Image (cartoon, helix red, strand yellow):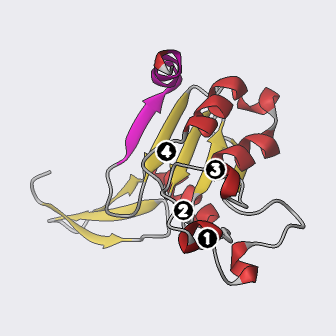
Amino acid sequence: MTGFFVTNILLRCNYFHIINSKGSIKMGIKSWNDYFLDMAKTCSSRSNCLRAQVGAIIVGQDKKIKATGYNGTPSGVESCYERGECYRIKNNIPSGTCYETCRSIHAEQNAIIQAGQDRCIGATMYIYGHNFICILCKRFIVQAGIIDVYLKKDDDAPVLHVSVDDIKRELEDTK
């Protein structure tokens, strides 16, 4: 792109402008992955978990959103935020262990519940706020029929891709 330079990058929009040396404007469009990961980040802002804010989006092959989810307590259950403390933080319980001590539903599970299996088959899930999928959510993802997952821990992290075939192989290797 000789003779081009970026003049504006609009962080909350889907496009950016490139102006060439003659002053002509060319528009670039955000990738679908970046677009949906940004939406998953927005979903994470609804989390009432004190430990992690995670958002998830399920997107059909037609690029239409099927459901969203975030980690938090089930409807009508007092959250750790409302209580002012997290049992898991207070007792130094490592992430990824002792799920039965957590009051929250994971973002991935919440999105799948909201969508229902018929809307998940063949879909892609985008997760913001984590760079791994727990064993429980892996089972949900496979059972729901989701075929690809993209994860991004934070704004500075790389995007990770996990296929359902990778998840199935891992589950088969589980003892």
Q: Residue at x 50, y 25 (%)?
A: 167
Most foreground residue, 73 or 5: 73
Q: Disc 4 vs disc 1: Cβ atoms closer than 8 Å?
A: no
State the image coordinates of residue 51 (x, y, percent, origin top left).
55, 69
| Magenta stretch: includes residue 157 | no
Nearer the viewer's eye, disc 2 or disc 4? 2
Of label 2 and label 4, which has the lower sequence position?
4
Q: Residue at x 11, y 59 (%)?
A: 3
What is the crowding at mark 1: few (fewer than 14 residues within 10 Å), some, or many (at least 20)? few
Q: Disc 4 vs disc 3: Cβ atoms closer than 8 Å?
A: no
Query: Dot 1 corresponds to which residue?
Result: 45
What secondary structure is found at the residue carrying circle 4?
helix
Q: Alpha carbon of mark 4 to alpha carbon of mark 3: how far?
A: 32 Å
* Residue type of the residue flagged with mark 3: Tyr
State the image coordinates of residue 142 (x, y, percent, origin top left).
63, 25
Residue 53 located left or right of residue 83: left
State the image coordinates of residue 155 (x, y, percent, origin top left).
38, 64
* Residue type of the residue flagged with mark 2: Lys
Nearer the viewer's eye, disc 4 or disc 3? 3
Of label 4 and label 1, which has the lower sequence position?
4
State the image coordinates of residue 50 (x, y, percent, origin top left).
60, 73
What secondary structure is found at the residue carrying circle 2?
helix
User: Residue 134 sits in which quadrant?
Assistant: top right
Most foreground residue, 160 or 66: 160
- Which numbered circle lies on residue 32? 4
Of label 1 and label 3, which has the lower sequence position?
1
Q: Which residues are magenta?
A: 159-172
Query: Dot 2 corresponds to which residue?
Result: 41
Most foreground residue, 156 or 49: 49
